[in-house]
Image: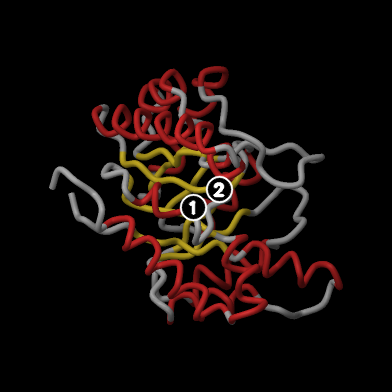
Amino acid sequence: MENRIRLFVNVDHVATIREARKTIEPDPLTAALLAEKSGADGITVHLREDRRHIQDDDVFRIRNKISTVLNLEMAAVEEMVEIALKTNPYQVSLVPEKRQEITTEGGLNVISQQEHLIKIREKIQSKGILYSLFVDPDLKQIDASHKVGAQSIEINTGRYSECEDSMAVQHELDKIRIAARHASELGLRVFAGHGLTEENVGAIAEIREIEELNIGHSLVSRSVYHGLEKATRDMIQAIQEGCSRRTGY
């Protein structure tokens, strides 16, 4: 396995700022191009059903203008499947959605909707689009992800990112390590994301099975002070420092 983690930059919250005024700036496409210029391996957007930040046109423009690849996060609903089939991104990542939530609050419950997810997978993969599921570090959910034919999982690092007590942090890290190893043994590619920052990403980057990270809010926040190019470069450096501590290669 390559001793390097890919960084996909999520530009949702650039659109959040734009939508606060319902104007034309800042443009998430411009942010995506700057992230690429700074070394990002791909761009992630979450087209939510309520369109609170990313809009349909953003998805099409970013897909057509970036030089890397697009990871489209979306709910497991027919409307989004049809948009994905028209847009033809590199990858679709299914995530749970609640209208009242501020941000994604947990992983997808794969166990409860296996037949539905198999049908979506068949449509997505018929177009050659990679199929990924965003799940908590729960072995039963990972087993179900394998059963429905997912090619990869993205492990939810939200709980880890929220921990302040060192024992709680270690507990969540252990769960993520076990989940990543289990998924890899099943043949799933392993990604991770949610709530990661320059300060806490290193320990995640040390996990040898993880090959890709999706990071957005922290980068957009830091870009207010330092610019998106520097924020992206600094994040890549923090990730690679974690990778350099990996063992077993």
User: Residue visible at 31% across and 43% down?
Assistant: 207
Judged left or right of residue 18, residue 68 is left
Q: Nearer the viewer, residue 93 or 135?
A: 135
| Cα gap from disc 1 to disc 2, whole angstroms | 11 Å
19 versus 249 height, above or below? below
Dot 1: few (<14), some (14–19), or many (≥20) neighbours within 10 Å?
some
Mark 1 or 2, closer to the camera = 1
33 versus 249 height, above or below? below
Mark sitting earlier along the chain (1/2): 2
In the rendered image, which quarter is residue 25 located in?
bottom right
Q: Nearer the viewer, residue 182 or 248?
A: 248
- Mark 2 belongs to which amino acid? His
- Mark 1 belongs to which amino acid? Asn
Numbered circle sitting on residue 200:
1
What x and y, as percent, mark residue 163? Answer: 59, 39
Q: Nearer the viewer, residue 197 or 55?
A: 197
Residue at the far right in the pictured view: 21
